[in-house]
């Protein structure tokens, strides 16, 4: 079995690529990072170090790595032979990889099914990728299938001198929507196949990602560097607890999760995030604040749903305020966010950045949170 995975970075090596190799796939990594490609090619594989109560190290060498640009012909050939294509490149990069996937599909001469999955921290990311692939193809062959996924594993920023080895938490979850995969024989034992992915996507996004981001923004506000350090701060813990109460209300009401089971899920999530061995930097977690303030992302998404239930998402709005203060020297979105805060009125920011129109029940309280931050800035 063969797989092509776009993105040989931390998630690629430390999660998706590792799970695929564990399942017996020969993995072709495709990337544009010349230094990383060179390290992978010159090494005898790489090791995944799982950071739990006891460290576990697993060596991987059932792969090759291609430069997506310089080795395009070889990449197209690999797609032509593949059973599975996956990607963990960031949702904003998915449109950029669609053309070469389309060319690979056109080059296929085998009748076996090809399953394509975007493995991103976003709702229905595969739909983004498939729409761009279909823009290029005149006709989609019957043996090409797309599946949305929900993926969950914390892989913190790595030290450059340890590459290509990668460290990650022990926990991982890969949930695949099987509703469109009839006629395939997808074999990934570590993945969970479900008929309805939406509850799993929103549970993960509005619990794990929302908690992670809350800790990062509140942690930086209170002078902390790592997620684990931030969680030891009673002020941060209090906000996280209240945020989880709000998102739990949304998830239990909307999807019918058992409240006791979901409380255990939240508890396990916070234990994972508190793992000091991960050395997870709040700056890494908080980056791309503009994207994370968009309509169906991890803050505005649950806040809007809670407002639609007639409740004010006070804790989530507190995190939104903290997100407007977030700073990262190397993140262009931080500068763009600052520019928008300077140039847009509260209602313009709410509608243009957060996607909340004026008649939505969240609009007034969200506009007030934006105005409060802008008022603070104007008095500095």
Image: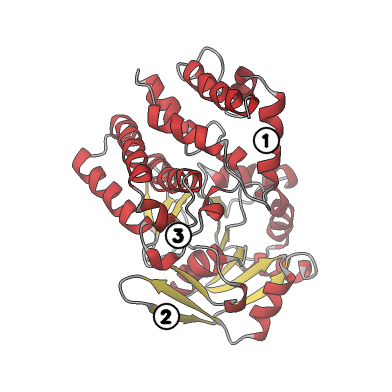
243, 327: nearer the viewer? 327
Q: State the residue position of label 1.
A: 338
In this view, the residue in front, 175 or 52, is 52
Q: Residues within 10 Å of mark 1 (few under 14, many from 20)?
A: some
- Write the residue at 33% across / 32% down: 246
Q: Residue at x 49, y 50 (%)?
A: 223
Q: Secondary structure at mark 1?
A: helix
Q: Identify the disc placed on residue 154.
A: 3
Give the answer, above or below, for where 284 lies relative to 363. below
- Mark 2, residues whose alpha carbon is within 10 Å: few (<14), some, or many (≥20)? some
* Residue 40 % position (x, y): 64, 79
Task: In this rendered view, identify the residue nearer to me: 190 or 284.
Answer: 284
Q: Is label 2 or label 1 in front?
A: 1
Q: Which comes sooner in the sequence, label 2 or label 1?
A: 2
Q: Which mark is residue 57?
A: 2
Position of the C terminus, as image quadrant, is top right
Is 45 left or right of 315, judged from the image as shown? Answer: right
């Amino acid at each position: 079995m063969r797989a092509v995975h776009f993105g040989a970075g931390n998630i690629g090596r430390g999660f998706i690529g590792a799970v695929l190799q564990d399942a017996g796939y020969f993995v072709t990594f495709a990337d544009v990072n010349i230094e990383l490609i060179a390290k992978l090619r010159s090494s005898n594989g790489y090791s995944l170090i799982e950071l739990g109560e006891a460290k576990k190290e697993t060596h991987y060498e059932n792969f090759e790595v291609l430069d997506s640009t310089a080795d395009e012909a070889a990449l197209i050939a690999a797609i032509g032979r593949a059973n599975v294509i996956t990607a963990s490149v960031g949702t904003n990069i998915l449109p950029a990889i669609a053309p070469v996937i389309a060319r690979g599909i056109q080059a296929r001469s085998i009748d076996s099914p090809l399953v394509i999955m975007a493995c991103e921290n976003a709702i229905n990311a595969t739909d983004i990728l498939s729409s761009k692939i279909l823009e290029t193809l005149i006709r989609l062959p019957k043996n090409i299938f797309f599946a949305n996924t929900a993926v969950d594993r914390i892989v913190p920023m790595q030290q450059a001198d340890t590459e290509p080895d990668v460290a990650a938490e022990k926990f991982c979850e890969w949930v695949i929507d099987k509703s469109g995969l009839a006629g395939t024989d997808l074999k990934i034992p570590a993945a969970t196949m479900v008929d309805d992915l939406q509850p799993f996507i929103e549970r993960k996004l509005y619990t794990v990602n929302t908690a992670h981001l809350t800790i990062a923004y509140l942690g930086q506000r209170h002078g902390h560097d790592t997620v684990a350090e931030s969680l030891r701060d009673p002020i941060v813990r209090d906000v996280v607890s209240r945020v989880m109460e709000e998102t739990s209300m949304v998830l239990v009401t909307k999807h019918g999760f058992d409240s006791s089971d979901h409380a255990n899920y939240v508890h396990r999530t916070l234990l994972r995030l508190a793992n000091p061995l991960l050395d997870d930097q709040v700056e890494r977690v908080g980056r791309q604040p503009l994207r994370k303030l968009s309509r169906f992302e991890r803050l505005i998404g649950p806040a809007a749903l809670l407002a639609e239930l007639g409740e004010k998402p006070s804790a989530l709005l507190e995190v939104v305020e903290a997100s407007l203060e977030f700073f990262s020297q190397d993140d262009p979105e931080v500068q763009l966010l600052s520019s928008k805060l300077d140039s847009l009125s509260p209602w313009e920011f709410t509608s243009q950045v957060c996607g909340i129109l004026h008649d939505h029940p969240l609009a007034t309280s969200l506009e007030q949170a934006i105005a409060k931050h802008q008022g603070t800035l104007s008095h500095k």
